[in-house]
Image (cartoon, coloured by chain):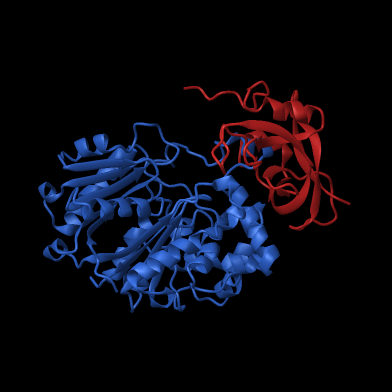
Amino acid sequence: MAESKFPNIDDPETAPFWKGTAEGKLLVQACTKCGYLRWPPGPMCNECLSTETTWKEISPTGTLWSYAVYHRAMNPKFKDQIPYTVALVELDEGPRMYGRLVGKPAKVEPGMPVRGVFQEVEPGVMFVNWEIKA
Amino acid sequence: MTLAKTAIIGIGATEQGEIPGQSADFLAARAAAKAIEDAGIDKSQIDGLITCKPPMSPAKVGTDENIGQMLGMNPAFASTLEYGPGAFSLHLADAAISAGLAHTVLVTYGTNLRSAGASFGGGTRDWLTLAGLVHIAGPAAMAARRHMHLYGTTEEQLGWVSVAQREWAQNNPIAVFREPMSIADYLASPYVVEPLRRPDLTMISDGGAAVIVTTAERAKDFKKPPVYVQAIAQQSAMRSDQNADKLMRPWIKDIGDRVYKQAGLGPKDMDLVYMQDATSVWVLQMLEWYGFCGIGEAGPFLAEGHTRPGGSLPVNTNGGQLSECYMWNWMHLYEAVRQLRKECGPRQIAKSEVALYAQTHDFYKGAASILSTHAG
């Protein structure tokens, strides 16, 4: 079976996220029953197993949990981008997300506060990357 | 110690490294034939077969059907593991025997990943690829960075994982990487994904490995001294991204607590330690979670040389996946059995009666076994 296109911004399961990023907003799924905020998206609450879900806008702010600096392109797709840095961010409202750490910060250290920046990562696809809060 | 239910009576391995022109199934079958010879068993006495599918391979590779047919066997019990590193395959054999599905199980694995040109760089979970987090080196680097941040661990301290394993590999004729590597050489090698360097990351290689497991009662009837499976434990950690501190794998401590309790032993009783090392960071973490040093203390522990030849805690005496070969933890098992049978020549550990054999997947699934020369 052929892999489906990713990201498919029209996929009903993730379309609200992409609609949000296009408008500079961060939306994640929120369980209607227990309120658990989940990322990445899925059809069922990982906590209470409810399938009733809404999308909720949350603050694109959090803490840098850790980061990794790619000096070699481990996938040819990123050959022209090295060196680049990937961040793991713990959002203030709970979920954890991976994205690029962008900007030219003087110092990077886990625990630093970060904010989301909405950037085009593929033609027509806006994603949330991260920068160290000044 | 509790009384072991099962024991390993035979082991086999092909050459390791680059083996062009041989299929994964053929390599698994060749290793199986060697294990049969090692045990001095007739294949008609084997009533169970466990195979496992190599990572990043087509669906029909590594199945019990393929390999059972090649070996001309009609085992009562046969099964294929989708995720079957040595530790999980051994556990399934132990469970099948304990449940009475079979009394003697051949467990085998083969891979031609290197010759097939496989790479870890492709994204399978696309949210990660979108972020550029490709290859296991990425999350491993994040875990290392976090450890450095929390505990002050240095790159040099981490470097002792691969330097010590290279020292061990120098006395292992099977090992692919045997050239000397000092800590200065390590620090001089360029970053791949900072703070990790090439020596921190597993190679990709071809090979086959197999073990034969039987009941503790039957085990004494074969050619080689039995290596008893004293205790086994697993933790799946399937919540994955929903687990806080996923990349630190704190749930491994739970495996250690249970496997030690089941054996009635503790970390101080382990003469030898085998830890699957997709990256050096796995060893750094497992040294702590399995209680060989305090949480956050693996850096100084490594730099003190405990895991090196002559040190107080021999770790991955085959060189591990960083220096010997990439066999999904199978060759760690092969080495553990050989050390316990005192077959390791210049790298043989004098006191080798009890070994911890531990494995973990990228950031979920872990398994540990305590292997012993004593039945109980």
Determine the colour of chain A: red
- Residue occupying the point 68% across, 43% down: A98
Find residue B347 and report its horizontal and vertical position in percent: 37, 71
Residue B179 seen in the current view: no
Please say if B327 is above or below B74.
below
Horizontal placement of B263 versus B325: left or right?
A: left
- Numbered marks: total: 0
Horizontal placement of B333 versus B49: left or right?
A: right
| A28 or B347, nearer to the observer | A28
Residue A79 lies in what quarter of the image?
A: top right
Find residue A133 and report its horizontal and vertical position in percent: 85, 50
Quarter of the figure that contains the C terminus of chain B: bottom left
Horizontal placement of B176 versus B147: left or right?
A: left
Quarter of the figure that contains the N terminus of chain B: bottom left
Residue B107 seen in the current view: yes
Find residue B88 and report its horizontal and vertical position in percent: 36, 52
| A30 or B66, nearer to the observer | A30
Chain in blue? Answer: B
- Residue occupying the point 18% across, 51% down: B100
Horizontal placement of A17 versus B256: left or right?
A: right
Please say if B158 is above or below B278.
below
- Residue occupying the point 16% across, 40% down: B73
Please say if B201 is above or below B122.
below
- Residue occupying the point 20% across, 35% down: B69
